[in-house]
Image (spheres, rainbow, N blue to C red):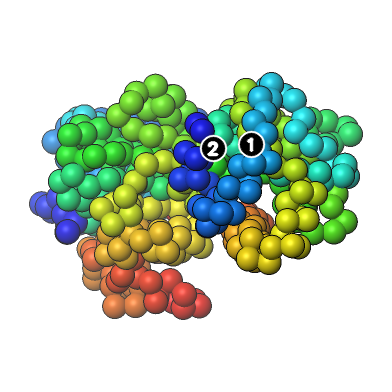
């Protein structure tokens, strides 16, 4: 099983794109839609977004790979660049490079597809859900497990409601903190493994979230019998050039911008336990 | 879901041998619990344990100044109640049905007595309970890390 990369015609080429809309997802997270004629991407890839005069940040594409003409990015405010990006208004311009990196693998025909997202990790996995729904006959069963801190922190609530209303995908949503009016589950995402249908030996698992959470999820899946080579994680480091030259995103023997960000757990397992790597 | 079908859904029951299940099936009681009904309350005597056949149960902490905090939710096949298994046999949390729920209820005193008399059942059942408790401890520890604000994007 392999990942694929969409070719970047001009690796350092900067497009100036206009913001179509900016909507708040949660108290600290916004989704911006960009008018991007001619730019295509695969689920799991990222772009370098440049807030003019402030700086550049790597941001995963969170939109539908089958909706050409727009790029969607979901951004959490963590510093000056993401503050500036979240503050963009319709009609404003920003610079965009990419797409970069590998995509989520499709998995084998007839496999079960298990998507496990934690927090903002739902953003790079949302395109994978769209991709799976567009190719639903490829899989026996498709499941999404999504964990967040509180119900207010859940992203893409309209999508979740829509996916829950179809029989094409099993959706389990869980949070860490809630009151008894919360309709979903409370607990760690691994608690939800028993509530969705997948055959461990024939499952492709796509996982994105905080690294400690991904490690716990990957180990739990391994213990259930999912091969480490079939569990895929999306990692992020301090990406600068995005084309494997500068070395800022080096993670052991990989440059995550070029060799990742999506890598299989069998390649990553030992490195995820190394302090300060 | 019948009691025999529940065996496939419940990790606790799946670990037991047929003769032990036979004993449990001889004392089991099927109970319907209305939504928002309390299954057991904190500090009450732990007189039974439950396995969920359908529905959802929340473990919660009452908050005098506001709405109760949900610690964890449990669903189909999950074991509800651990405190019946060790002294002082008192519940530490409140369990409440979050939806119309059907459970299988097992009398704790009868199970404890049988486990004392039949060490094979005792070992299997307590190992199974320990596994469930260990998983809950591990996930509780991970949740203590409060991971999600640091998620990548």
Which of the two residues, B103 or A170, is positioned nearer the viewer here?
B103
The residue shown at (38%, 72%) is A269
Rendered position, A237 above or below A83:
below
Distance, label 1 to label 2, CA atoms, is: 8 Å
Question: In screen coordinates, is A126 left or right of B140?
Answer: left
Rendered-image quadrant of the C terminus of chain A: bottom left
Q: Residues within 10 Å of mark 1 (few under 14, many from 20)?
A: many
Rendered position, A261 above or below A31:
below
The residue shown at (24%, 57%) is A101
The residue shown at (33%, 26%) is A167
- x and y percentages locating residue A143 in the rendered image: 36, 40
Which of the two residues, A123 or A162, is positioned nearer the viewer here?
A162
Q: Is residue B98 visible?
A: no
Question: In screen coordinates, is A73 left or right of B113?
Answer: left
Mark identifier at residue A259: none
In what element is the residue under mark 2?
A: helix
- x and y percentages locating residue A79 in the rendered image: 52, 52
Rendered-image quadrant of the N terminus of chain A: bottom left
- x and y percentages locating residue A109 in the rendered image: 15, 46
Rendered position, A14 above or below A240:
above
Mark 2 falls within which chain?
B
- x and y percentages locating residue B95 in the rendered image: 74, 37
Mark 1 falls within which chain?
B
Mark 1 and 2 residues: CB-CB less than 8 Å, in contact?
yes
> Which residue in the protein does label 1 denote?
B104
> Which residue in the protein does label 2 denote?
B3
Q: Earlier in the sequence, mark 1 or mark 2?
A: 2
Which of the two residues, A193 or A120, is positioned nearer the viewer here?
A193
């Amino acid at each position: 099983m392999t990942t694929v990369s969409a070719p970047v015609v001009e690796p350092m080429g900067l497009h100036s794109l206009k913001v179509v809309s900016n909507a708040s997802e949660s108290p600290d997270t916004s989704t911006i839609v960009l008018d991007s004629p001619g730019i295509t991407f695969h689920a799991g890839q990222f772009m370098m977004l440049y807030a003019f005069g402030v700086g550049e940040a790597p941001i995963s594409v969170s939109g539908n790979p089958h909706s050409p003409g727009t790029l969607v990015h979901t951004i959490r405010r963590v510093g000056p660049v993401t503050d500036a990006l979240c503050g963009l208004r319709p009609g404003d311009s920003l610079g965009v490079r990419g797409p970069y990196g590998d995509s989520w693998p499709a998995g084998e025909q007839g496999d079960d597809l298990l998507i496990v997202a934690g927090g903002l990790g739902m953003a790079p996995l949302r395109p994978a859900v769209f991709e799976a729904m567009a190719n639903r006959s490829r899989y026996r069963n498709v499941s999404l497990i999504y964990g967040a801190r509180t119900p207010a922190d859940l992203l893409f609530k309209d999508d979740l409601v829509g996916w829950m209303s179809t029989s094409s995908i099993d959706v389990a949503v869980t949070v860490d903190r809630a009151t008894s009016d919360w309709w979903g589950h409370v607990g760690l995402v691994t608690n939800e493994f028993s509530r969705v249908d997948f055959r461990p030996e024939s499952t492709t698992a796509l996982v994105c979230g905080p690294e400690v959470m991904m490690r716990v999820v990957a180990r739990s899946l391994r213990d259930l019998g999912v091969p480490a080579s079939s569990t895929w994680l999306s990692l992020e480091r301090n990406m600068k050039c995005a084309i494997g030259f500068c070395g800022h995103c080096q993670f052991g023997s990989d440059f995550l911008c070029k060799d990742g960000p999506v890598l299989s757990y069998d390649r990553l397992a030992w490195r995820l336990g190394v302090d300060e790597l | 879901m019948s009691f025999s079908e529940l065996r496939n859904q419940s990790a606790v029951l799946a670990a037991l041998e047929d003769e032990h299940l036979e004993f449990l099936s001889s004392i089991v009681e099927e109970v319907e619990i209305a939504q928002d009904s309390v299954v057991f309350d904190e500090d009450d005597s732990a007189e039974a344990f439950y396995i969920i056949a359908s529905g959802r149960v929340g473990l919660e902490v009452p908050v005098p100044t506001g709405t109760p905090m949900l610690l964890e939710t449990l669903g189909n096949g999950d074991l509800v109640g651990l405190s019946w298994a060790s002294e002082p046999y008192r519940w530490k949390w409140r369990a409440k049905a979050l939806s119309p729920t059907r459970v299988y209820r097992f009398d704790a005193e009868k199970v404890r007595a049988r486990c004392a008399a039949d060490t094979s059942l005792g070992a299997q059942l307590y190992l199974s309970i320990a596994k469930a408790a260990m998983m809950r401890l591990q996930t509780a520890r991970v949740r203590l890390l409060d991971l999600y604000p640091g998620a990548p994007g």
